Image (cartoon, rainbow, N blue to C red):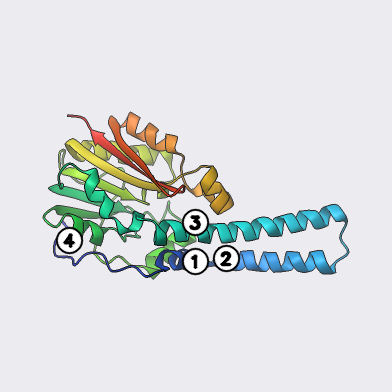
Amino acid sequence: MTAAIAASPGARPRGKYQGTVQIVRYNWPFYVAAALVSAVGLAAAGLVALPSPIRLLVLAGVGATLFWSAGSLAASYWVYDRSELCRWTWIAGWFPAPPRRFANLHAGLDESSPALAALFPDSRAELLDMFDPAAMTEPSIARARRITPPELAARPVACTRLPFPPDAWDAAFLIFAAHEIRDAGARLGLFRELARVLAPGGRILIVEHGRDLWNFLAFGPGVLHFLPRREWLRLARESGLSVVREQGFTPFVGALLLEKGA
């Protein structure tokens, strides 16, 4: 099935705080737990006769919890509501010509396909949902899929077995999607499949948070859900793809463009 997105009116206008609100809605148990832990910790430090070292540890834990709660919201606002990233218009300049055929792969949360439809109105598109409930078990993913259903229908696929012939696409998009594949072997399988179905000169655009210092400062232990830059370079190298462009959007998110050789 090919998703006919050419007739889509394009991405809906984003609200001023839409990205930040979505982060809270998808991860609300974390923020509720952080508030409760902080309240209990402050009450214990102020009302219970604790030894000084224990009191300091409790206050340090409360401070870290509050810092990362606020930091994650500030980073989310910067990335999703203030930067040019989620306007998506920059994507067109990363391709020498509009792709005739492209695929947008996601894990059930898809807010980029309408924008791609507006950017490439004459392209033929495949919208593919790689969500695997057996492997992608984080509750936040289920909440995101329930709260923000995709505007356009997508075809379910297994990430390591794409049902397309060689040279099927000129471009593929992985926008905040590839990190949801937690198994390294499955990720490599996806990239090798993408290399197989891309035409010579075809390009893959990856957009991801990084597992780095900036994201650690913003998200604390949550940074482990992201993958380091060297993982994307490994996947490119082992799939026979080359890096042709790279750019950061805020210190927290980067875009990487890979190309299949002739």
Is 19 left, or right, of 97 in this rendering?
right
- Seen at 39% across and 56% down, the residue is 83
Amino acid type for the residue under numbered disc 2: Tyr
Nearest to N terminus: mark 1 or mark 2: 1
Q: Which of the two discs, 1 and 3, sits closer to the camera? A: 3
In x, y percent, where is residue 168?
A: 15, 43
Nearest to N terminus: mark 2 or mark 4: 4
Is 174 left, or right, of 45 in this rendering?
left
- Seen at 57% across and 63% down, the residue is 30
The quarter of the picture where the C terminus appears is: top left
Amino acid type for the residue under numbered disc 4: Ile
Is 259 left, or right, of 59 in this rendering?
left
| Residue ID for mark 2 | 31
| Residue ID for mark 4 | 5
| Residue ID for mark 3 | 75
In x, y percent, where is residue 167?
A: 15, 39
